[in-house]
């Protein structure tokens, strides 16, 4: 047996799985009662210790305790993402549980800082473990990640320590980390060879990266016999992505929907549904003029940084309809959707590689990268302070290396123009035909 099983953290996680599984078949009244109880626990703390919530309560429009979920929705206003991004301290409890700050991916190229208590974060991880369990995958089984790492391009000792720490953690947890940054034929061949050698039970990665790997595996007629599950996440995953991954890699494929600030929102099930983890979050959908439905999330387990009716800026294709029992399905979530880039040698470069190059400089607030038809990159950078020095030479060098020598031009600007390419596309390629990825 894996010795990690005996560590207190993982023993507690294993004990929680039966409880998490049992909630999935609760009646609607039991689910809503549990949500209301957790909501009032968060609110009872937040209204006296969180500046934003204190102001809501003192307005006299929000009660000290909610008698129903309907009362909560009727009295608490929607919370724009921009409010949290602009002043995270306004949402931080004055008496936080032990934890740490996390940084979102920034779907507009503008990351947000959020605080998670260690216990709340571990509970979200256990909900992910429960999803894997439903596919006959244990959370300590060997796992491959087709992913990026925010420290990959960080300079100096800090960057080296981040990379060492990630490598050590992966070895400790029996994880194989494959870079999603460059996905040319050579890289994809190497990824498949390493997976065949490592024999992972599951593969977790960016939706478009797994889809690209799966298409390559089908072309090469290569399978990884040990695989039982592929989890596509962090990007939209249309049905043909799942079908391709399942057929080419010879395993079940599912979706995970979550975010850094809200944790696990919904997870896939073997019956091919994506269901909201309603013991962790309360989700609403609000109709928009476009015909889509805005997703609004209330996190139920993190009083240290409460997000109430948070507008995550993702959309669902249809409104959610709660069943009489079991967790509520949600369909066709549309979230972060960015182009990859094409290098001079024709290799696909995942958008997260570009993001991590720019995020390595914490003086950068927002950015937008456009690849012209010629292949050259135009990079607009909005720093927190124009008077601070941004190392644009280093950024241009790293990005040029990624795209095999195309020219990179950086421009500093006081404020990026609003949504030049749509909210979810902070990386745009005019060289890449978007349907070609489908």
Image: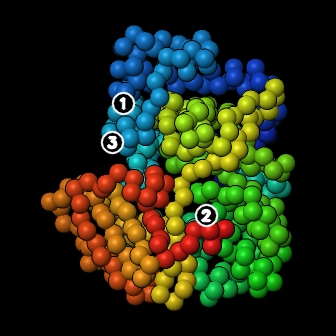
Which residue does the numbered mark 1 point to in the structure image? 94
Task: Give the SS element for disc 2.
Answer: strand
Q: Is residue 168 visible?
A: no
- Mark 3 against mark 1, which lies toward the viewer? 3
Q: Locate the C terminus and report the quarter of the image it occupies.
A: bottom right
Cβ–Cβ under 8 Å for marks 2 and 1? no
Question: Position of 231 compared to 149: left or right?
Answer: right
Q: Nearer the viewer, residue 28 or 140?
A: 28
Q: CA distance from mark 3 to mark 1?
A: 18 Å
Seen at 35% across and 83% down, the residue is 407
Residue 191 lies, in percent from the top left, at 66, 80
Residue 266 lies, in percent from the top left, at 67, 44
Task: Give the SS element for disc 3.
Answer: helix
Report the coloring of the rendering: rainbow
- Mark 2 against mark 1, which lies toward the viewer? 2
Seen at 73% across and 26% down, the residue is 31
Which dot marks residue 206?
2
- Mark earlier in primary sequence (3, 1): 3
Instruction: Using the image, determine if residue 405 lies above or below residue 399.
Output: below
Q: Is residue 234 visible?
A: yes
Which residue does the numbered mark 3 point to in the structure image? 86
Seen at 31% across and 65% down, the residue is 380
Determine crowd level at label 3: few under 14, some 14-19, many 20+ residues with C-alpha closer than 10 A: few
Q: Nearer the viewer, residue 163 or 63?
A: 63
Residue 180 lies, in percent from the top left, at 57, 72
Which dot marks residue 107?
none
Instruction: Using the image, determine if residue 428 lies above or below residue 49.
Output: below
What is the quadrant of residue 218 in the picture? bottom right
Instruction: Using the image, determine if residue 432 lies above or below residue 39.
Output: below
Task: Give the SS element for disc 1.
Answer: loop
Q: CA distance from mark 2 to mark 3?
A: 27 Å
Residue 188 lies, in percent from the top left, at 65, 82
């Amino acid at each position: 047996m894996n010795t990690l099983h005996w560590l207190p953290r993982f023993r507690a996680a294993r004990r929680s799985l039966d409880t998490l599984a049992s909630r999935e078949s609760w009646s609607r009244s039991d689910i809503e009662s549990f949500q209301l109880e957790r909501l009032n626990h968060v609110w009872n703390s937040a209204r006296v210790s969180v500046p934003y919530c204190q102001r809501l309560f003192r307005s006299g429009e929000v009660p000290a305790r909610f008698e129903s979920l309907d009362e909560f929705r009727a009295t608490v206003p929607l919370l724009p993402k921009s409010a949290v991004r602009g002043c995270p301290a306004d949402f931080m409890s004055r008496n936080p549980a032990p934890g740490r700050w996390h940084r979102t991916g920034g779907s507009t190229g503008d990351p947000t800082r959020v605080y998670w208590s260690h216990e709340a974060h571990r509970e979200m991880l256990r909900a992910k473990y429960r999803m894997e369990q439903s596919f006959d995958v244990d959370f300590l089984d060997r796992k491959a990640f087709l992913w990026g790492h925010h420290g990959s391009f960080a300079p100096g000792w800090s960057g080296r320590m981040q990379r060492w720490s990630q490598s050590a953690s992966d070895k400790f947890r029996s994880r194989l980390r494959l870079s999603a940054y460059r996905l040319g034929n050579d890289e994809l061949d190497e990824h498949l060879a390493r997976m065949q050698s490592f024999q992972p039970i599951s593969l977790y990665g960016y939706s478009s990266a797994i889809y690209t790997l799966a298409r390559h595996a089908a072309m090469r007629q290569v399978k990884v016999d040990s695989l039982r599950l592929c989890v596509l996440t962090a990007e939209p995953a249309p049905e043909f992505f799942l079908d391709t991954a399942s057929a080419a890699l010879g395993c079940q494929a599912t979706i995970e929907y979550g975010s850094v600030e809200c944790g696990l929102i919904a997870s896939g099930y073997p019956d091919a549904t994506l269901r909201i983890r309603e013991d962790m979050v309360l989700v609403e959908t609000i109709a928009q003029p476009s015909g889509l439905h805005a997703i609004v999330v209330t996190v139920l387990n993190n009083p240290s940084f409460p997000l109430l009716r948070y507008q995550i800026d993702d959309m669902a294709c249809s409104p959610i309809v709660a069943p009489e029992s079991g967790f509520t399905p949600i369909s066709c979530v549309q979230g972060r959707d960015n182009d990859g880039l094409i290098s001079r040698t024709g290799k696909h470069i995942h958008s997260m590689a570009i993001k991590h190059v720019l995020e390595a400089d914490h003086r950068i607030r927002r950015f937008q990268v456009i690849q012209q038809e010629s292949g050259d990159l135009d990079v607009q950078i909005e720093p927190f302070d124009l008077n601070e020095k941004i190392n644009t030479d280093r950024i241009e060098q790293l990005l040029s290396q990624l795209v095999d020598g195309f020219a990179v031009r950086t421009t500093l600007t006081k404020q990026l123009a609003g949504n030049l390419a749509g909210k979810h596309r902070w990386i745009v390629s005019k060289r890449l035909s978007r349907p070609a990825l489908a």
